[in-house]
Amino acid sequence: MQNKNFDIWLAIGLNILHYRKEQGMTQLQLAEKCNLSRNHLQRIETAASSCTLDTLINIAEALNIPLVKLFEFKD
């Protein structure tokens, strides 16, 4: 995915990766909790593809974090 929002999607993906690893969860474990394929989750984490808001809500719920945490971007 190379579009004008790539940097935002990359930041969201890195936040997902951060919270997933912080909880000691594998991509497969998180993907299963969200009813996604591991490959799709990997593509979201690396900003190779975007996803729906519903998917982001499911990911945040599976990680037991508020949705807003996925949108907290570091400089």
Image: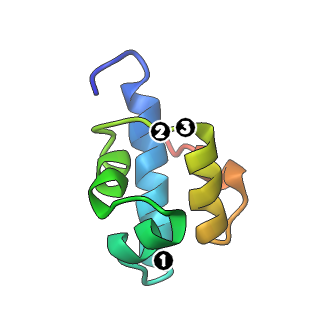
Q: Which mark is residue 22?
A: 1
Give the mark nearer the N terminus: 1 vs 3: 1
Q: Which residue is mark 2?
A: 51
Quarter of the image with the N terminus is top left
Amino acid type of the residue tagged 2 in the rendering:
Cys
In three-dimensional space, the C-alpha distance between marks 3 and 2, rounded to whole angstroms, equals 4 Å
- Which tag is nearer the camera, tag 1 or tag 3? 3
Q: Farthest top residue?
A: 4
Q: Position of residue 13 (x, y in %)?
A: 42, 49
Which is more toward the observer, 46 or 7? 46
Residue in the picture at 41% in, 77% down: 29
Q: Which mark is residue 30?
A: none
Q: Secondary structure at mark 3?
A: loop
Task: Specify which label sits upstream in the sequence, 2 or 1.
Answer: 1
Q: Secondary structure at mark 2?
A: loop
Residue at the bottom extreme, as displayed: 24
Q: Is disc 2 surrounded by few (<14), some (14 to 19) or many (20+) residues within 10 Å?
A: few
Q: Position of residue 68 (x, y in %)?
A: 70, 49
- The number of callouts visible is 3
Residue farthest front in this picture: 35
Residue 52 disc label: 3
Specify whether 40 is left or right of 58.
left
Pick the front one: 40 or 6:
40
- Residue at the (39%, 30%) spot, across then down: 7
Q: Residues within 10 Å of mark 1 (few under 14, many from 20)?
A: few
Q: How is the image coloured?
A: rainbow
